[in-house]
Amino acid sequence: MSDEKAALTRTRIAYLEGLGEELRDRGFAVRLTIPQGGPPSLHVVNPRASALAENILAESTDGTWWFWWSWAERIAPADDLGEAAGRVTRVLAVTGEYSS
């Protein structure tokens, strides 16, 4: 693995670990997955309804890091862990679980 690719992987992991901590604090089960030859992802599960689960990626676009859903839609800037965790919480919530 080149130094540049290794640095990108370390950055992805750091952002995903930060989001994982935020989501764990909100009661979600999280697992960082680092497949050989593929990008790291954060597997997030609502423990109250295990069908509510998602794999989240961290990618740089034009020099800005973003969290992404597996269906290639942006969640929030990776530097805004609170916003990203809030959006993930709302999407993976059981109906009425996290209503405002």
Image (cartoon, rainbow, N blue to C red):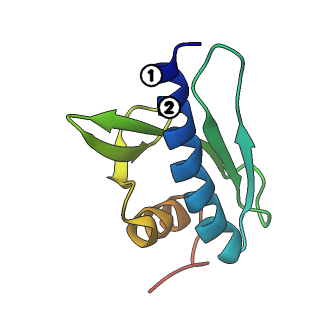
- The picture places residue 9, in percent across and down from the top left corner, at 55, 31
Where residue 94 appears, as percent x and y from the top left, is 64, 67
Quarter of the image where the N terminus is located: top right
Q: Which residue is mark 2?
A: 7
**Quarter location, residue 82:** bottom left
Left or right: residue 93 versus residue 49 is: left
Q: Are marks 2 and 1 in contact (CB under 8 Å)?
A: yes
| Any part of residue 94 in sight | no
> In which quadrant is the C terminus drawn?
bottom left
Pointer 1: residues within 10 angstroms few (<14), some, or many (20+)?
few
Q: Position of residue 93 (x, y in %)?
A: 59, 66
Q: Residues within 10 Å of mark 2 (few under 14, many from 20)?
A: few
Residue 33, horizontal then vertical, whole percent: 72, 36
Mark carried by residue 33: none
Name the residue located 45 percent from the left edge and 32 percent from the top edge: 71
Task: State the image quarter where residue 55 is shown.
Answer: top right
| Residue 41 appears in the rendering | yes
Q: Amino acid at mark 2?
A: Ala
- The residue that disc 1 covers is 4
Horizontal side of 13 relative to 66 (left or right) equals right
Q: Residue furthest left?
A: 62
Q: The residue tagged with tag 1: helix, strand or loop? A: helix
Residue sitting nearer the eye, 22 or 70: 22
Q: Identify whether 86 is placed above or below 52.
A: below
Q: Which residue sits furthest bottom?
A: 100
Q: The residue tagged with tag 2: helix, strand or loop?
A: helix
In the image, residue 38 sits, relative to residue 58, either above or below, namely: above
Viewer-proximal residue among 26 and 49: 26
**Residue drawn at (71%, 44%), measured in percent from left and top?**
32
What amino acid is labelled 1 in the image?
A: Glu
Give the residue at x 51% y 20%: 3
